[in-house]
Structures are given as structure tokens and as C-alpha cells.
Amino acid sequence: MNVLSEHHSGKKRNASPRHTSINGVGVGFRSNHFEYIEKNRPDVPWFEVLIDNYMMDAGVSLYYLEKATEAYPVTFHGVGMSLGSTDQLNKDYLKKLKSLIKQFNPVYVSDHLCWTSVDGYHSHDLLPMPYTDEAIKLLVSHIKQAQDFLERRILVENVSSYLNFKDSIMSEWEFLKIVVEESDCDVLLDINNIYVSSINHNIDAIQYIKNIPVERVKEMHLAGYTDMGTHLLDTHGEAVHEPVWKLYEQALNKFGNIPTLIEWDNDVPEFSILEEEAAKAEAIMQKVKSRAA
Amino acid sequence: MLHELQTSFLRGIYNNSLEDIAYPFIKETSGKSAEQQLSIYRGSIFGGLKKALAETYPVTKELVGEDFFNMMLGQYIKTYPCHVQDLNDYGEELAEFIQGLKQVRSVPYLAEVAELEWFYNVCLNSEMENNNLEELSLLNEEQQERIKFNFTNGAGLISARYPVDLIWDSHVNSLEKDIDLKKECVYLIIWKNVNNVEINRLSDKQFYFLKNIKNESSFSNACFEFLNKYPNANVTKMLADVIQQGWLRRFSIL
């Protein structure tokens, strides 16, 4: 079969099977592994899809995504909503996202508690919010608008941060808690980001985790940072570091066995390395589970 | 206040005026000055854009080496901040930017290679539109006067002073072949043929025919301009030829 000519035809396909939940430790669905996944159907409970890379009408990526969703549950993770920007939400982006949601039925849809663009300038980076009432009001409004438009609840992820704003009047966890409760959204808790920010700003990571409302956390992220000497940088280009594994165990103790993703976006290794990382996370999950039982 | 913070932040990052934005908004903490904190973001934003541009311009990068390429991109990003949501759409002005650089005069074909790579990138990321040319036979005479032909998605035309198609090919495919760099005009079309991006040479006549079709408001205007330059050309035959090649796939009525 000439798959290329078929998926370049632009024909709309039937919706993928509807999975309603995810469990255990998933990995990122990255182009380096498309062929491997299709051919080998690895024993992975679910995949997270970086959905900004699929916002076209047809193409190779969509073909592989369609194949993957026939066999696995997926979640959608985005970087393009720019929920914290003082610009209006990008309706074209949301329309494309909604169309993909309808087509592929992700279990969760998430983006970040940050801003990426303003006034026509795009950073393609996850920029931090000042922890102020004005920022809360804006984020709550944008999250509600996004949820109304998409007709579903979204998850928001805490980002790594490398600076402090003078205007901030509360801690990051207080800020996060108020935003998610007022907007009635859920949380994608990135354990690596908490650790990176805790080192960069000399804050207590355990205290952070203790203050996140349990019922809101639906997914967790694990990734590797890079030690730049003066600060830690969230690069997603290395294996998960030991202090992050320890913090992850603390998080599982508090939140229970929340589905967790191994994120690896730069210098992406062979799929087997991701499976090894996932197995480590799974072992910690089982350890916490048996201790609780 | 938040809007002022965000606009100052991002403009300052792009303009490299970190001091101006640092003092009003950033708190010095953990032994780091406001500028040091901001420079982390600047490095991260510029790094992400450079990575995207390096993927779009691999041969341009190879021709000048990684260090110079990165330095050049640093200047480029400051001159042309990113205004697009899709990173594949960023970098359109790099060829024009290179033309103004004194440092690359020893590589006189660099800007033309960059132009070729940009069109290649556009074609690669374009979606195929359905061909509607069979509907041409349904048009009446009055409608035929108002036809505008559209190029295959993303297709680009280049008139280059050097054989940039050969230069590009030798780098992409690591070919050890001698390329005669003597100045001779090369006309190229870069286009998407179903799944693959193709680079084809054109005759000067084909080039001007296609260029007029692309630039003029209608096909009749394009023919008028073209016949001024090539009065003996057979326009009907040329049109049939470019359609057969797959370079024109659609038309609209103005």
C-alpha cells in the first residue's frame, strides 16, 4: 500500500476509538519513533502527543498518529494556547485543536500555565507569569474560554522558571491552586519543573507538592534537566535525575498512582531508553502502591 | 500592568535591551541579577529559534560553518523577531538578510542557496490541494478572460547567478563532485510533486512565462507581458507543458 499518497490525499478519516482513561507510565509520541511504534507495537500503556506538530490537514505525522490511536490511548499536550498572554486567545489554533480532539479522542488535553506570545511577537518558549491577582484573573478567564470552546476540561501544567517578578505577591503553588480552582480545570503536575524551579529560586519542593489540591492532579510529567552551573535548565534532553525520582515518590505518596509521562524532546534516544525510564517510574509507582496497601 | 510587562519583556529579549526591561519588573534573587535572570530566557528563546532555522537551512549552515551560522542567526533574530505561531514559517527573510552581510562575500552564492532552502521548506510543509484544472473546459469566453492560475502549493521560482541546485544537491547528498562556479544564470522551480519536493531547471522562456503567471493579476495579463518579451512564443503550447509538468494545479476566476 502506498501510505504516503493516501495520507496526502487530505481525506477525513473516521474518529479513533474512544479510550476514557489512562494508567501507568506513558511516553511521548515523537517522530523519531513513528516507524518503530507502528512496526513493533511496544508494550506502552499510552502516548502523549505534542499536538502543535499535527495541526495540518494531512501528512505523514497524521498518518502515524491515526495508526497509534487505533492501538493506544493518547493525551494531547500543547504549547500554543498562550493562556497567560494579555492577547486574546488564538481562535484558529483552538479550532484546529478542537477538530483534532474530535478526530482522535484524547483522554486529556493539556497546555501550560504561562504565556508564549504577545502583541504579535512569538517566543516559542514557556514564559513565566507574575503571581498577581491580575494574572490570576486573566488566566482564569482564558482557561474558561478555552474549556468552553473545546467543550471539555483541560489540564494546565506548571512550568520551570528562571526569574522572579517584583510584582509577585504569592508563591507559585498558591497561584496555581487559585487558578485551577477558580477556572475549574485540572493539573498536569511536572515534577521535574518543580525541582528545577525549587533549585533556581531556593524554594521548598516538598512544600510545593503538599499545597497542590489532590483531586485536581490528573497527570504527572518526568523529564531530565541540564545543570548549567549557575542554574538548572529544563531541557528534556537527558534521563530523569535522582532528586526528581525522589520527589516523584513523594508526589505519588500524596496524589496516589497518577498516570505519568516520561518526556524526552531533545537528543531523543532509542525507544528502549524511554521504556527503561518508564519502567523505573512504574517500579516507584508499584512500591508506593504496595506500601499504601 | 501585565500587558506592559509582557510587551517589554519580549521586545527587550529580541532587542537585547535587557537592562531596560530588567529593572522595572525583575527582582534580584538567589544571587542573580535581573539581567542574569532574563538572559537565561534570551538564551532559551534564541536557542529555540536558531535550532528551527538550522533545520530549515542545513546547507546554508554547512557552507559557512556552525559558529558563523549561529552568530549570523543571532543578528538575524534581532533584526527579524519571530511573528509566526508555526516555527516552520519563520526565517523567510534570511536570504535577503544574507545579501546585506559583508562577511559572506567570499561565498557569493550563499543568499541564493538560502533562497532555495526557504522554498524547499515551504514546499515540504505545504499541503497538497486538489487539482481543479479539468473544470477549465466548463468556462465560457468571458470567464476565460478572468482566469488566474495558481501554482502548486508553496512552489517558488528562482533566478540565480550560480548553479545553486548543484551546490545544494552536492551538500545534501554528500557528493564529491566539482561544480563549475562560473557565473551563469540558472532558472529554477522548486515545487511539491505529491510527496516529494523537486527542484527543476527551467529555460529562460519557461521562467518568465511562469513568473508572469505568478505575478500578474490574471492569465491574460501574464500572456500580454510575456508576449512583449517573447513575441513569437506559442503560449498555448507552453501552458499545456507547465500543466503537464504539474507546476500549475489550480485556477480561480477573478
Image: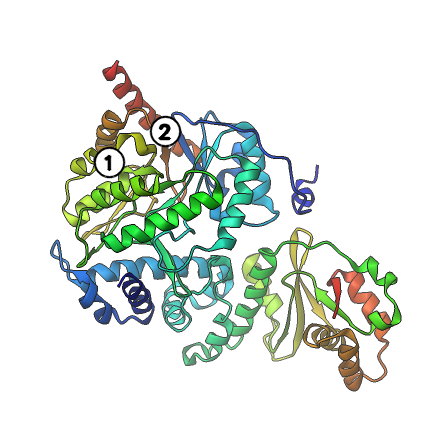
State the CA–CA distance, disc 1 to disc 2.
16 Å
State left or right for residue A242 relative to residue B126. Answer: left
**Mark 1 surroundings: few (<14), some (14-19) or many (≥20) residues within 10 A:** many
* Local secondary structure at mark 1: loop
Q: Which residue is drawn at 22% across and 41% down?
A: A195
Q: Residue at x 88, y 67 (%)?
A: B140
**Mark 2 surroundings: few (<14), some (14-19) or many (≥20) residues within 10 A:** many
Viewer-proximal residue, A52 or B69?
Answer: A52
Q: Where, by quadrant of the figure, is residue A17 drawn? A: top right
Which three-letter amino acid code belongs to the residue tagged 1? Ile
Asked if labels 2 and 1 touch by Cβ distance under 8 angstroms, the answer is no
Residue A259 percent coordinates (x, y): 36, 29
Q: Name the residue under label 1.
A: A212
Q: Residue at x 55, y 65 (%)?
A: B118
In the rendered view of the protein, which quadrant contains the C terminus of chain B? bottom right
| Mark 1 or mark 2, earlier in chain | 1
In the rendered view of the protein, which quadrant contains the N terminus of chain B? bottom left
Q: Name the residue under label 2.
A: A259
Q: Where, by quadrant of the figure, is residue B187 drawn? A: bottom right
- The answer to whether residue A78 of the structure is visible from this angle is no
Q: Residue at x 60, y 34 (%)?
A: A15
- The answer to whether residue A124 of the structure is visible from this angle is yes
Which chain's residue wears label 2?
A
Viewer-proximal residue, A140 or B69?
Answer: A140
Which three-letter amino acid code belongs to the residue tagged 2? Pro
State left or right for residue A153 relative to residue A11. Answer: left
Which chain's residue wears label 1?
A
